[in-house]
Amino acid sequence: MNVKKSPLLILILCLTVLAAFGFTRQRTKKQIPHTRFVTGQKIPTVALSAPPSVRSIRQSSDQVLVKFKSDLSIQTRIMTLSHFRSNVIRHIPQIDVYQIQIPGDLTVDEMLILLEQNPDVEYAEPNPFCYTCVSPNDTLFQYQYALYNSAQSIGIPGSPTGKLRADIKATEGWEETKGSDSIVVAVLDSGLDFEHPDMVDIAFSRGRDFVNDDDDAMDDLGHGTYISSIIAANSNNGEGIAGITWNCKILPVKVIAEDGSGLYVWMIEAIIWAADQGAHVINMSIGGDAASQTLEDALKYAYQKGVVIVASAGNDSGLVIYPAAYDSYVLAVAATDYNDTRTPWSNSGSQIDVAAPGDRIIGCYPVWALPGGTLPYVFGFGTSASAAYTSGLAALIVSIKPWLRPNEVLDIIRFSSDDVNGAEYPGFDEFVGHGRINMEKALVPIKIK
Ligand SMILES: [Ca+2]
Ligand SMILES: [Ca+2]
Ligand SMILES: [Ca+2]
């Protein structure tokens, strides 16, 4: 690896904030070249004012439900169905309704028209799919394709539509747990905007600021707020977005300065501090190109204390950055998109463990960083977001079984993931690791045991 000669080792924020809603913040400070923030792209806020329903109705493509007139004999019913080349899958005697399989050369709509024209049929209708009941009422939930992908438009004007259920199965996972308020995720980043309206009371404490050496990790950049919101924004509060965990707490630890960079030693101190504070999970959506024995030692210290450590793989189509590259102690997370495809900029290597959505991810952003009157949410790109989703899942697993060791938690996350590139790269590979994380498959088995 190329070790930088500068005494200031640059930590790369693994996120590009693409588009705030009318985000026009001007920076007067010198930008660090490695900090890839793109500003100035505008999104009309009207797009967020009146979201349509989260889900479009889906139905079976080869089944319908039929009720015959009650005085019709069994023989006539069977003859009628035979005439329509349809097989009975199920009869529900209490209401006298048949679930039938329709011929392959007819669509559901065509079959329904034929049935409705038959005088022996009282009614016929499609057989729609139902869903799990945990669907939060947050107004921007429809933009969170990563949690529930209904094949909707991703949200940025001109953006493509997603693939149905190319998501992490959050709604199913929430049936098992929404997280415990005794579980703490330390977010080593730029801090947290404690005033954000969709992040009320999510902080375990005011945290620690290793940049300014004080006990107040207020965010002066935005990245840490964004990442924390993916993990633990106020969910089902009728506002903004839903977090992966509804109840777990965020311990903000500031290691990234206002200019978007930080010293390794801040990150190293923060890992040890968070572990000593009793954090259950450490999220590091940050990293640098330099290997560091001290950094590895700090990770080992936290790991041996029982902390689950999750980090971003990096966003420059290169090798896995540090600390994600420390394979023995850290879960390295790559990025997929709304089609379950690995993003081209996601770093790769044998250290990659899993992938999670990282393309066009909506999250909270500090109110002060945005022009007045715009909603305090932005769409971002990056393995930063992917790590945050995965840390959230780790917190949910630990919420159910707080006694699990880090390697056990990491193995649950690895081996419950979906091999989304299995057609091209069956099994483990260096692009998505074991696959895109799956909350349902991770949480259901441990809840039952
Ligand atoms: Ca919310
Ligand atoms: Ca690894
Ligand atoms: Ca694979």
Image (cartoon, rainbow, N blue to C red):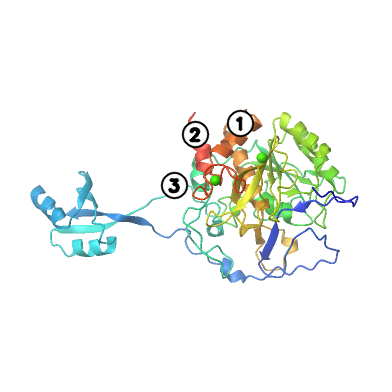
Quadrant of residue 351 within the rendered picture? top right
Q: How far is disc 3 from disc 1 in space, using C-alphas?
A: 28 Å
What residue appears at the point 83 percent right and 37 percent down from the top-left corner?
Answer: 294
Write down the residue under mark 1.
408
Q: Is residue 233 visible?
A: no
Amino acid type, callout 1: Glu
Q: Which residue is mark 3?
A: 132
Local SS, label 2:
helix
**Alpha carbons under labels 1 and 2: distance apart:** 13 Å
Q: Quadrant of residue 35?
A: bottom right
Closer to us: mark 3 or mark 2? 2
Residue 426 at x, y = what percent?
52, 45
Residue picked out by circle 2: 445
Residue situated in front as seen by the camera: 383 or 204: 383
- Marks 3 and 2, Cα distance to the nearest angstrom? 17 Å
- The amino acid at mark 2 is Pro
Instruction: Tell me what residue is drawn at x 83 percent, y 58 percent.
Output: 259
Mark 3 and mark 1 lie on one chain; the one further toward the N terminus is 3
